[in-house]
Amino acid sequence: MNRFIALAAMVVGSQFTNAEDWSQFRGPNGTGVSFEAGLPVKWSKTEGLRWSVPLPARGVSSPVVHGGKVYITCSSGALDNRLHVLAYDVKTGEKLWHRQLAATGGTNCHPMTCMAAPTPVADDTGVYAMFATGDLAAYDADGTLRWYRSLVGDYPSITNQVGMAASPVLADGKLIVPMDNAGESFIAALDRKTGKNLWKISREREIGWVTPLVRVYEGKTEVIMSGRGVVTAYYGETGEKLWSQKGTGPSDIASATFQEGVLYSPGRGGTTALKAENGTFKELWKSPKLNGGMSSPLVYKSIVYAATGAGVVNAADAVTGKPLWDERFKGKASASPLAGDGKVYVFNEKGLTTVLKAADKSEILAENDLGEETLGTPAISGGAIFIRTDKTLFCVGAK
């Protein structure tokens, strides 16, 4: 059986033991899909909330949930060089701890983003927080600093004048750090206990914002990284390149996703569905309509969804690529859509969430406005949706 063909259920499942945890960008398997029931449909600033708490500063990273805690990052200061890591109680919203760091790398970026752009990743030992400055810190669950690295200090040519946003993930018991940039580009695996490199593989010097995908097949962990013009898989144990596929036009912003052995690769020209055949990938279909821009595609119940920067959700059959429907939503999306409990959630940049029925026909179930800038992708855990805005962390769900 070809090693490339793996069931989506195997993607990083071994890294996350609690089904309610949402420990990384786009959830436990990196696909933005929750398997929980009873997820909320309607809410506002005054209704349908478990709790809400003010944040000390701005951020566009996602919240992550693990072991009864919600972790989040922020950045502040006139130069955006004050870096924050916070933990909240998942049930009450009580602030458990707040730690701060001084940035060691440059803070130039597009005004839409900030230094708190990469999403942290958590496990039973605590949280790993990376910032667009190249500062990387590991804290235990009680907020004690375990280790710290200045990646710019280690690799001084790292630079991205518009801001970095790729997020670390866990794979094979290691912390995977993506660092595509205009300087020294690489992907590295770090020891979770010490932060030291276990392996480091050079990549093309190109700016990128893609978060890696991880899957396990026949006991072997693959770390899949997209860039301009190529998708590459690395062996999680050693960093050895397992395979690469050129010419698929992968995105350097949005991240790919999986379902039933098919890779759905976003690009500037839409989304391409790829499946391994005879040692290489075969293109199943390509849909220019499924162009999400900065947001990543979502595959749920055999339908592919893409929320565009122009304020349109496009849906297509995941097997054939045949367009099913399109639906306008208010505003435009930077956050990636999420799904669960038969619903698709689309988040616009102004804080309005459009809830759609996951079906082959368009149906809007609700529009919920929080009225605050929302650029980071939310998290789903314990029957609730955790939405971070530029000012507030909201826990949306029945009490």
Image (tube, rainbow, N blue to C red):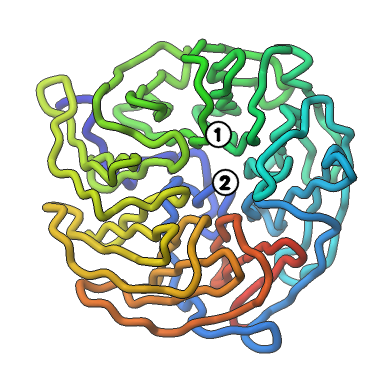
Quadrant position of residue 58: bottom right
* Residue visible at 26% across and 36% down in the picture: 6
Identify which amino acid the numbered label 1 is placed on.
Answer: Leu
Quadrant position of residue 106: top right
In the rendered image, the quadrant that contains the C terminus is: bottom right
Identify which amino acid the numbered label 2 is placed on.
Answer: Gln
Residue 149: mark: none
* Residue visible at 37% across and 32% down in the picture: 216
Mark 1, residue position: 170
Is 89 on the left or on the right of 170, as rendered?
right
Residue 288 lies, in percent from the top left, at: 24, 49
Q: Is residue 232 above or below residue 131?
A: above
Quadrant position of residue 307: bottom left
Q: How many marks do you count on the picture?
A: 2
Is 77 on the left or on the right of 217, as rendered?
right
Whole-number angstrom distance, CA of label 2 to CA of label 1? 8 Å
Pointer 2 or 1: first along the chain:
2
Q: Residues within 10 Å of mark 2 (few under 14, many from 20)?
A: many
Residue 103 in view in this figure:
yes
Is 205 on the left or on the right of 222, as rendered?
right
Q: Residues within 10 Å of mark 1 (few under 14, many from 20)?
A: many
In the foreground, 21 or 115:
115
In the rendered image, the quadrant that contains the N terminus is: top left
Mark 2, residue position: 24
Residue 324 lies, in percent from the top left, at: 18, 67
Residue 332 lies, in percent from the top left, at: 48, 64
Looking at the image, the residue that sits furthest to the bottom is: 47
> Do the CB atoms of the residues marked 2 and 1 lie less than 8 Å apart?
yes
